[in-house]
Amino acid sequence: MHLKTNYLKNITILSLLLIIFTVIPAIAQDAEDEDYLNVGGALRYNIAHQNYESDPTATNTYGTMDTWRLNISAMYSDVSLSFEYRFYPTFNTHFIHHGYLGYDFSDNLNMQLGVTQVPFGNLTWNSHSWWFLTPYYVGLEDDYNMGVKFSYDFSEKLNLMFAYFRQQEPAGPAYGSASFGGPGAGTYSYNVIPDNAGVLSNTGANSSIRELNQFNARLAYEILDGTTLGFSGQIQGLYNSVLEETDYGHAIAAHLMSNFDNFNLQLQFINYDYAAKDDAGETLDRVQMGAYGDPYYGDGVAARANIITAGLAYTIGVDWGPISSVQPYIDYSLMTKDGEINGMNFENTHMLVPGFLITAGNIFTYVDFAMGKNHPWLTDSFGTGLGAGHLDEAGNPVPVEDLDWNLRFNINIGYYF
């Protein structure tokens, strides 16, 4: 009851702020032309039907509020502000999505300071659907952390981004269970968090680790009109508070983004190694990760893996009343893992999402047929699949070679203002 009261109080405060910030621009008539303050947001709903491992029931089809959010952008004295805060009623949590100050040192050099998107892989997203793809679920797509980022244009075709992140973005009030939760579990993007139950270590030791000190560089070059080839590198620090040491892993990516006619093609290859240790000093094959108030219970995420992604979309302009375009797409990702448990190798994760986006003014509707094997969001055993595989009836991870595809038909309707 106390948590619910605080939740309602926070919603009330932010609603009042929304009213105040909406009125201020109308009053500030004397502001300079280049200064501004804009307030916006979004409200999104999901309609879903899921067909996973268990037999269907009446509750397999349902509707829910996905999220509502507040957006603020401003510019004063050449310093810009971009801020977004999100509420997820389904998960009983809320948190910052991003919030940073920006400054242009020149026409070619920009800085962002605060909670900003990690410059890694295809940007802004490496996918077309509402679901994103597997890299998002291991913290390597649309990831946000706290630090400083620079972007430099050598020319109209060549861009370099480099960044330093001290830590993950601030977490919201929900941290999942007491056994598994930790810093980073109540966030928008996925972060490595402590395993306080010792379920992911071969020695049974806890893993008191968290993200600390991350370095990123991203180089992108437009090799043809509308086609950009890029390379990204990340050095990821994981601090163990028991060992009092930081170990550094890596992630590297080659990526291509191409726009031709009405097509958009996205290709990407990722190799990563979190180089994490448990509290006994042993190298981990699986790490705990979390977001939205919940960690990946029981199975975690493979500490070393390769991920291949591919996506193709085609935009069709139409004049159907308020509908201006329809964009069919198909996205696929394959995650191959390096690790074994009880003499069995970790099983691959597959994700396939055909669907289409309908644009009607400020309303964007995603219609997705999301399919997955060993995918933590497409299973009755939520949170399992990115490590060894699914859990058995006793709650132990068991790699299964030939799983059936799990399916979720999902319609996401969002009004953006």
Image (cartoon, rainbow, N blue to C red):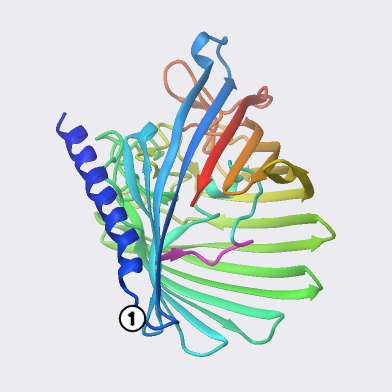
Location of residue 181 by image quarter: top left
Residue drawn at the location 56% of the way across and 25% of the way down = 48
Compare residues 280 and 303 and report the one nearer the observer: 303
Give how far across and how far down residue 412 sits, in percent.
56, 36
Q: Residues within 10 Å of mark 1 (few under 14, many from 20)?
A: few
Is residue 289 left or right of 173 when viewed as pictured? right
- Residue extending furthest toward the left: 2
Location of residue 293 by image quarter: top left
Q: Quadrant of the N terminus?
A: top left
Q: Is residue 343 above or below residue 61?
A: below
User: Which residue lies under the disc numbered 1?
Assistant: 30
Is residue 308 left or right of 119 when viewed as pictured? right
Compare residues 163 and 396 and report the one nearer the observer: 163
Residue drawn at the location 47% of the way across and 89% of the way down = 105
Give how far across and how far down residue 135 sits, in percent.
58, 49
Q: Is residue 148 visible?
A: yes
In the rendered image, residue 207 lying in the magenta stretch gets the answer no
Image: magenta residue range: 113-123
Q: Is residue 244 above or below residue 365?
A: below
